[in-house]
């Protein structure tokens, strides 16, 4: 039995189609990432799976339980950390944790081993009001509260949005330890670079899953030859490369540009010599393997063209 | 040549807490300046002072030629500001948003009419002038919001995490818009959590615990710290932070 199963799920808000015909499966014990920009439908899917919202069409189950019929049972078995800060600001750290434990009919003592790893980092501040905590500490408390009843599936809706690169890394290290304890983790993020930290991912855009699988599997399906190009000045180079024959698309990626080419028309050597001839300085062009972000942009583009 | 921003020994304290600790830096006219730091490093506090919304405890400087201590009102009128979190009124139509901000910045009706035409044709948004902003795709909202931040032709524009949460292509298209703006001489002061975007800046500063730990071009920073990319530079510096958020 899979931890989560979603079949042909659709949901509209008035005229806005938030999800259209989504299907996916999350296996027991894996970290599954739902990756896509704001407005793609991520939170809607989370709310349906956590039984807070009903779908218009299709079906979904968590631990084999139907999200509509068996909502009460599901709620006891899952942990949910919504995107917005979900704690009681006027309660202390300890009071928040006790509150969530009580709601689920358990105690902090009983499940202390589940949260110990994360909670011990904020325990020295247990008398502080949740509202007075720093962002990183709030996140640790919210995660402790979502885990205190020993859920088998943990839902994390954009836990790293707006979080700096260093804290994001810390958070993913915590997720790896949660996974190691046997919990299935379903996590959403707008950061493409976090895909490589998941066992499997689904890429979502405009309410549709545009691809899913292991990060390596998605990368292997990339249909074009991808080149990295550098040259001074960079922005005029971007415009120059877009106008070249055989260049399917070209975008900046940090200190370099990535260009997808039709290898029957052009190649790295030709582009490099053309760039040099056109007067760009310090030129370099070489073939690279695509990352998830390259794949996402290509798939999202195809989806729009369809 | 006059700099767009000149800051000397800027400090801001809240009680015992020193949010911004004696920072000094300059931003050259026409450059893209990336203002990075971990959550809680003091970026927001510093940015509020630069935008004329807060007065420093000590130190001083100028933004767009105006004194940050004595002329914060003038600064507010002469800078542009855009944030992903808030910029446009969703329940107003596209033209109404332009009208509103034009009015706030004291443009005449005639100027507003001509700026409205320029903005809509520049963005290819003539067809949606009567649409509610709420109904626009995120990428369009973002471009409109940037153009509105520039409605009064400011010499410097502050962009506070302008690309948070948008899809990868839209994020890149937005940076192309920034490049276009700077080629016209506008200075851009930008914060971001995407480290690839730090590479697009002419200069990058990294704040750690209220102080500026590093400030240079991305190429020079990568060389200095022996790092492959800005993400590695950032982790090296921000990872040393002592204080929480």
Image: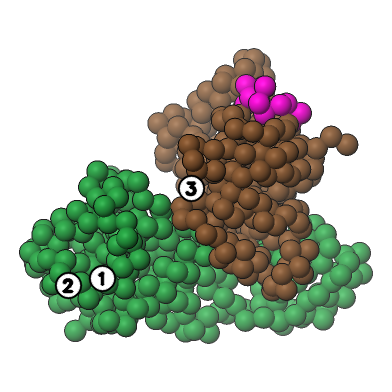
Mark 3 to mark 2 CA distance (whole Å) = 42 Å
Q: Position of residue A181 (x, y in %)?
A: 27, 81
Q: Is residue A198 above or below residue A45?
A: below
Q: Residue at x 20, y 72 (%)?
A: A112
Q: Secondary structure at mark 3?
A: helix
In the rendered structure, the residue with mark 3 lies on which chain? B
**What is the spatial separation of the Cα atoms under label 3 and label 1, in whole angstroms?**
38 Å
Identify the residue under disc 3.
B138
Question: What letter labels the chain drawn in green?
Answer: A
- Position of residue B171 relative to residue B9, above or below, is below
Asked if marks 3 and 2 touch (Cβ < 8 Å), the reply is: no
Residue B70 belongs to the span the image colors magenta = yes
Residue that numbered label 2 is attached to: A111
Q: Which residue is mark 1?
A: A115
How far from the left and from the top, in percent, is residue A179? 32, 79
The reply to whether the C-beta atoms of the residues labelled 1 and 2 are less than 8 Å apart is yes
Which range is magenta?
B63-76
């Amino acid at each position: 039995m899979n931890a989560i199963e979603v079949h042909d799920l659709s949901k509209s808000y008035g005229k806005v189609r938030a999800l259209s015909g989504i299907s996916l499966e999350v296996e027991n014990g894996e970290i599954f990432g739902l990756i896509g920009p704001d407005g793609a439908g991520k939170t809607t899917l989370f709310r349906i799976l956590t039984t807070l919202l009903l779908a218009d069409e299709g079906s979904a189950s968590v631990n084999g339980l139907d999200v509509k019929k068996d909502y009460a049972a599901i709620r006891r078995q899952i942990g949910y950390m919504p995107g917005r800060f979900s704690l009681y600001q006027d309660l202390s750290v300890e009071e928040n944790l006790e509150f969530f434990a009580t709601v689920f009919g358990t105690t902090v003592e009983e499940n202390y081993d589940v949260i110990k790893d994360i909670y011990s980092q904020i325990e020295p501040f247990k008398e502080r009001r949740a509202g007075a905590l720093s962002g990183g500490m709030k996140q640790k408390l919210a995660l402790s509260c979502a885990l205190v009843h020993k859920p088998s599936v943990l839902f994390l809706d954009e836990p790293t949005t707006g979080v700096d690169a260093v804290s994001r890394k810390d958070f993913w290290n915590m997720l790896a330890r949660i996974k190691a304890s046997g919990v299935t983790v379903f996590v959403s993020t707008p950061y493409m670079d976090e895909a490589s930290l998941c066992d499997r991912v689904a890429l979502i855009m405009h309410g549709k899953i545009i691809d899913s699988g292991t990060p390596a599997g998605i990368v292997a399906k990339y249909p074009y030859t991808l080149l990295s190009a550098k040259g001074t000045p960079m922005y005029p180079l971007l415009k120059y490369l877009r106008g070249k024959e055989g260049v399917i698309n070209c975008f900046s990626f940090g200190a370099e540009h990535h260009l997808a080419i039709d290898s029957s028309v052009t190649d790295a050597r030709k582009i490099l010599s053309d760039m040099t001839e056109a007067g760009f300085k310090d030129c370099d062009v070489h073939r690279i393997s695509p990352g998830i972000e390259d794949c996402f942009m290509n798939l999202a583009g195809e989806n729009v063209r369809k | 040549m006059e700099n767009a921003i000149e800051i000397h020994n800027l400090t801001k304290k809240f009680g015992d807490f020193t949010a911004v600790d004696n920072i000094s830096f300059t931003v050259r006219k026409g450059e893209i300046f990336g203002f990075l730091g971990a959550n809680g490093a003091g970026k927001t506090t510093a940015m509020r002072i630069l935008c004329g919304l807060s007065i420093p405890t000590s130190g001083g400087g100028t933004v767009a030629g105006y004194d940050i201590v004595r002329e914060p009102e003038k600064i507010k009128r002469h800078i542009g500001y855009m944030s992903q979190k808030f910029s446009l009124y969703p329940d107003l139509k596209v033209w109404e948003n332009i009208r509103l901000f034009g009015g706030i910045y004291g443009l005449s009706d005639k100027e507003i009419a001509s700026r409205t035409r320029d903005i809509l044709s520049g963005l290819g948004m003539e067809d949606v002038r009567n649409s509610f902003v709420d109904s626009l795709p995120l990428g369009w909202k973002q471009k409109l919001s940037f153009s509105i931040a520039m409605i009064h032709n400011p010499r410097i524009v502050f962009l506070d995490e302008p690309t948070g949460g948008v899809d990868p292509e839209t994020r890149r298209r937005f940076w192309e818009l920034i490049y276009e703006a700077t080629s016209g001489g506008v200075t851009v002061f930008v914060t971001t959590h995407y480290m690839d975007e730090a590479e697009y800046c002419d200069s990058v500063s990294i704040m750690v615990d209220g102080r500026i730990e590093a400030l240079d071009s991305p190429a020079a920073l990568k060389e200095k710290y022996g790092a492959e990319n800005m993400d590695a530079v950032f982790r090296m510096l921000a990872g040393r932070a002592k204080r929480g958020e």
